[in-house]
Image (cartoon, rainbow, N blue to C red):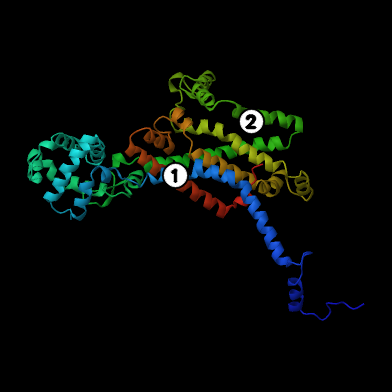
Amino acid sequence: MVDATAGSGPAELSHQHQDLKTRDGRSLKAALRRSEGAARRRAFYLVLPILLFLLITFAFPLLQFISRSVYNPEVSNFLPNVSSAISSWDGKNVPDEAVFAAMVEDMKTAYGNRTIGRVAAQINRQLPGFRSVIMSEARKADKLKPPYREALLKANERWGDLDMWRLIKRSTRVITPVYYLLATDFQYDAHGNIVQQPANSRVFRLLFFRTVWMSAAITLLTIILGYPVAYLLANQPLRIANLLMILVLLPFWTSLLVRTAAWIVLLQREGVINDILVWIGLIDNDERLRMIYNQWGTIIAMTHILLPFMILPLYSVMKTIPPSYMRAARSMGASQVTAFRRVYMPLTIPGIAAGVLLVFILAIGYYITPALVGGDSGIFISNLIAQNMQSSLANLKLAAALSTILLAFVLLFYWLFNKLVGVDRLKFG
């Protein structure tokens, strides 16, 4: 028998494969492409509802909230004539009559619409004392006669302050980075240059740094405490392991507020732990430890709350490691410690990495526990974000800027983590 393809080169074989037909005479390659395309479309249609749900309930609101951090239309909307007239002002001398006339016209309208207070409050936030200047003249705007420049300067000489007019000009910009500057402890000076805020006003960078290092410390403590527990669970008989797993999962069935309140009872100066330390003689009664309403209270309480998120990924990985690996290492002369360090522990790295990712990202955005047990020195940046969100519109814009910076840091951490460890190597269960 002679092979029909004998003597055929690679090009001829490729040509023969391209000429293959389906039963109905269509090209096999084209039919495969159509089939794969149909499968991809079916998969897309299946996930389309959850995709739309995420876009409507998460992505769009998130983008809208982030846009608030740079979108500042209030002054431009409430002082439209001033915004147009002051755009060509050089900022070196007191504005001309046209700008003052526009200010009087806008104050009349804004006072009638009851929006002048919002403009005055926004200017007063950066130049204290100017709210009363604007509000007092807005009440009398209908009685002012031209020339308005002389009338306003005669009524109050602070209308000649260049810093106020420079601030008004900057505030008429609809897109502004001012809230990101505030969120990083910077500000505009009187001449429009970016400078650091006074030393007693620099709080945000300190809070960002505190949030990161305390979250890292909590993550490290959960590794130290959770690794032995996960090892114990993975190497116990099923009946005992299930009982111990119930104890690990028990905090999930208890209210977060209840758990945090329990730590307040345990850690306070007259609490259970201090009473035990005094009773056994480790400390005197007048030397009770201060373990609550500070950084220690936050770290202790959050370590307990987030510990299961480290134990569960570790347990899921350890359970898949065959015991024969350790026995093989021991049979080849390795000690128990060496076998554990060089054989067992490297195999648990995917679980450690998954736990680190879970615990660190959860910790960095935590709010309730630091608010209850952190005091002044143990709160996170999330507590300040919540505080600003519950205040005025301008503070809401500052909260949006702080949230965006925190989100950008989490995304950067995730990107670096993926580069160094590889998210595809993680095992969550």
The C terminus sits in image quarter: top right
* In this picture, residue 415 sits left or right of residue 97: right
Q: Tell me the residue at 31%/47% (across/down).
A: 178
Mark earlier in primary sequence (1, 2): 2
Type of residue at label 1? Leu
Q: Which mark is residue 249?
A: 2
For residue 344, side relative to residue 298 (left or right): right
Dot 2 alpha-carbon crowd within 10 angstroms: few under 14, some 14 to 19, many 20 or more: some
Q: CA distance from mark 1 to mark 2?
A: 30 Å
Q: Is residue 128 visible?
A: no
Which residue occupies 26% across, 48% down?
172
Give the residue drawn at x 26%, y 40%: 122
Q: Is residue 270 above or below residue 319?
A: above
User: Percent position (x, y) of residue 428?
Assistant: 64, 43
The amino acid type found where label 2 is placed reads Leu
**Residue of label 1:** 406
Image location of residue 202, percent across then percent down:
32, 41
Quadrant location, the N terminus: bottom right
**Position in image of residue 309 (x %, y %):** 59, 37
**Residue sitting farthest toward the bottom:** 7
Residue 232, relative to residue 89: is it above or below?
above
Residue at the front extreme of this rendering: 24
- Callout 2: SS: helix
Please tell me which residue lies in front, 190 or 79: 79
Residue 45: % across, % down: 62, 49
Determine whether 421 is above or below 278 in the image: below
Q: Toward the viewer: 230 or 389?
A: 389
Residue placed most toward the observer, 198 or 173:
173
